[in-house]
Image (spheres, rainbow, N blue to C red):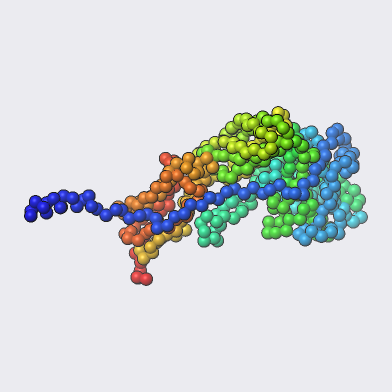
Amino acid sequence: MKTACTLLLSFLPLLSVAAPALLKQSAWETIKLVRPPVPRDVASIPMLRDLPKAPADRARQIRAKGVRFPFVTYPNGGKPELASTAYVCFTPTHLVAVLEGHQSNGYELLARPQEKEDGHIWNDDNFEIFVDPFLSRSEYIHFIVNPLGDVFDQRCYEKRVSDPKAADPAATIVQLIQEREYDSGARVPVLRETDYWAALFHLPFTAFGLKAPPLGQVWGLNFCHTNRENKELSQWRATPGRLGFHQPQRFGALRFGEAAAGLEAEVEMPHFGAGRNLLAATVREPGAKQTKLRWRVVLTDAQAKVVGRDSGTLRAAPGETQHTLRFAVPFTLRGRCRVTVELLEQDRTVAYVVYNQSLGEAVALAVPLTQIYTTDTTVEGTLRLNLGGGELGRKGKAVTLELVGMKQRRRVRFASPEGNVLRFRVDTQGLPPGDYVLRAVYGRRKPCEQPLTIIPAPFPF
């Protein structure tokens, strides 16, 4: 009998109870990037060569041969009491526009010399131009010009940040960022007459890294006039809403020349983030022969420094074909960045797409409630993976969640990310009071940590 008891006791360590599970509930979600479609209402502007040098002669020719865009009142889109108009074209080197606003005879334009470039120039009579290159619908350059020819310019972009009022930690809102230190170097000649004044706007294509005009491509633009005589605001495209004129999704759309005939292509980026990224290219070849295209992707950081380049070729069969373009994003890249994608058929640009993004940590935890009573049984949280499409799915690396503290260790491992957002509920039942760390790791990358504290409940619920 003594021998039997000894044998039973020797096996007891092997029959220990399994460690408690970390999560009571978890679910993967996939959130894709949403790129606004090209508007159906796109106006084509002509290319003019050899414009006169004298501002008055130049304005006269642009009025005669450029495309005319009349203004409507802000914010209701009515007819202005005093008319304003934009005339737009482009040259082999510049985007060119004449903005013209009428006034009563004898009205003295309000214009005060600016000792330095300042946004207060808006308090004068002024014209504004908003230029959204390549129709990003999120980043644009803003110009204000007064009757003295003083220019204020800034680079603006929309950034998605966590919504402080939302219960869902994954919810975001749009925040407008204005970089007033930006200097375009623009010089805007001004014409002043008895019943109107006009500003001649020139923007070089080299400011966007282009050696030639973006023929066939669509940009977003808007033109605005502040008339201090009758306190009237007018625009080409009305932009009612909380952000006033600063709504790139509501800008009008202009094409440089007519739409190119023949082969067409579209590029989409469902996900963007650190590591391997994937672009989906749709090519439509109306001809009967296979066509060879070259593609290139350039990644730049907030200082416009190139931090990544990828390129290759693809062969498009007649009809519509789908292709995958691959490029890499360094795991060390943070903050604002830009992805520029170009598809070329010989020397013709078939597609030119720009994505303006803001990149945070590759792995980000959001746990709204970090102080938990012992009577609470769960705590909700969200894990966001800021990873490229090539890092998601079965080809991605393992994702690990771990809670450590007070001699406790609870852990769960996902063999590969099944999406880029994981919503979970941590099981806190049975955890002794004290300090803990919730840790998330993608592969062997730097972990993301969130401190948690278990507090004795003041009374039982």
**Residue, x 9% and y 51% (percent of image)?**
3
Find residue 447 and report its horizontal and vertical position in percent.
43, 45
Residue 352 seen from this side: no
**Residue, x 77% and y 49% (percent of image)?**
41
Residue 416 seen from this side: yes
Q: Quadrant of the N terminus?
A: bottom left
Location of residue 409 with respect to 188 vertically, above or below: below
Q: Quadrant of the C terminus?
A: bottom left
Find residue 441 and report its horizontal and vertical position in percent.
43, 45
Find residue 146 and report its horizontal and vertical position in percent.
79, 48
Image side of residue 3 versus residue 128, left or right? left
Q: How many circles with numbers are drawn on the protein?
A: 0
Residue 213's quadrant in the figure?
A: top right
Q: Which one is nearer the viewer's eye here, 314 or 255?
A: 314
Find residue 23 and report its horizontal and vertical position in percent.
39, 55
Q: Residue furthest left?
A: 1
Image side of residue 308 versus residue 114, left or right? left
**Residue, x 86% and y 45% (percent of image)?**
191
Q: Which one is nearer the viewer's eye here, 307 or 126?
A: 307
Residue 83's quadrant in the figure?
A: bottom right
**Residue, x 23% and y 52% (percent of image)?**
15
Q: Which one is nearer the viewer's eye here, 366 or 421?
A: 421
